[in-house]
Image (cartoon, grey):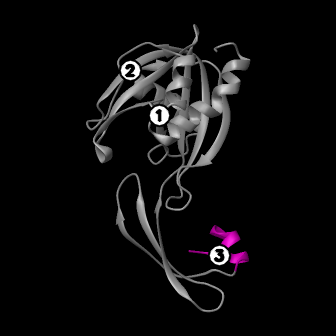
Amino acid sequence: MTANRKPNAARLRWQVIKTEHPYRNKTLSLRVDTVALPGGKELPYAYLERAPAVVIVPVTRDGQIVTVRQYRYPVDDWCIEVPAGGTHDTGDASLEEVVRKELREEVGATCGALTKVASFYTAASSSSEKCHVFLAENVEVTREPQTEPSEEIEVKLYSADQVIEMARHGKMKDSPCTLGVLLCESLLRERGYI
């Protein structure tokens, strides 16, 4: 690791002595840095390295939000979410291209206008992943989704009001999707979907 990859750590005089990756797969890498702190104390700092991701709040012309009900193996539960996905397999594609790809693959949809709403870290203490939230408008579900073998997905449309309520009251349990929906709330109101 070079100092310029973590300039704030360098300003704090944190020095990376060594970096190991005890586990990697196509979507993440477990990274363990041995860090020397000012004063000489050394400690291991472990976290997940992940590529950036997109969270999409897709709205149809009549104001319905396209959601997915998806089985999530780590928590052994069905989760109501909005479409989302990582950039780990998209090469040099722009975030907007990744949004359109995810809509096609996950829900079989196309969209018109895209608005980037915000960005956030999914778990800043344990992962490097940064999520970029987009509002997709004039969404049309035009064909069957192109899901991966491990994806069990049901596409469902709800009013924007219903999705906001699901996010507020814990019925949407995936935190990036929940935050993505809530970050879009004022724009959904401003554009007359709520």
Crowdedness near tag 3: few (<14), some (14–19) or many (≥20) residues, C-alpha within 10 Å: some
User: Which residue is tagged 2?
Assistant: 155
- 3 and 1 marks in contact (CB < 8 Å): no
Mark 1 residue type: Gly
How would you classify the magenta stretch by its main secondary structure?
helix
Q: Which callout, 3 or 2, points to the residue nearer the camera?
A: 2
- Residue at 41 percent of width and 56 percent of height: 28
Closer to the N terminus: mark 3 or mark 1? 3
Quadrant showing the C terminus: top right
User: At which x and y percent is residue 166?
Assistant: 49, 26
Determine the image quadrant of residue 157: top left
Which of the 4 image quarters holds residue 143? Answer: top left
Location of mark 1 (residue): 170
The label on residue 138 is none
Under mark 2, the amino acid is Val
At x 55% / y 40%, what residue is drawn?
93
Considering depth in this image, is 86 or 80 the residue closer to the camera? 80
Instruction: Say which element carries label 1.
Output: loop
**Amino acid, disc 3:** Ala
Residue interval drawn in magenta:
1-12
Q: Are marks 2 and 1 in contact (CB under 8 Å)?
A: no
Residue 158, percent across and down? 48, 15
**Quadrant (top left/top right/bottom left/bottom right) for the N terminus:** bottom right
| Helix, strand or loop status at disc 3 | helix
Measured Cα–Cα span from mark 3 to mark 1: 41 Å
Mark drawn on residue 3: 3
Distance in Å between CA atoms under marks 2 and 1 = 19 Å
**Residue 52: x %, y % from top left:** 54, 48
Name which of mark 2 and mark 1 comes first in the sequence: 2
Give whichever of discs 3 and 2 has the lower sequence position: 3
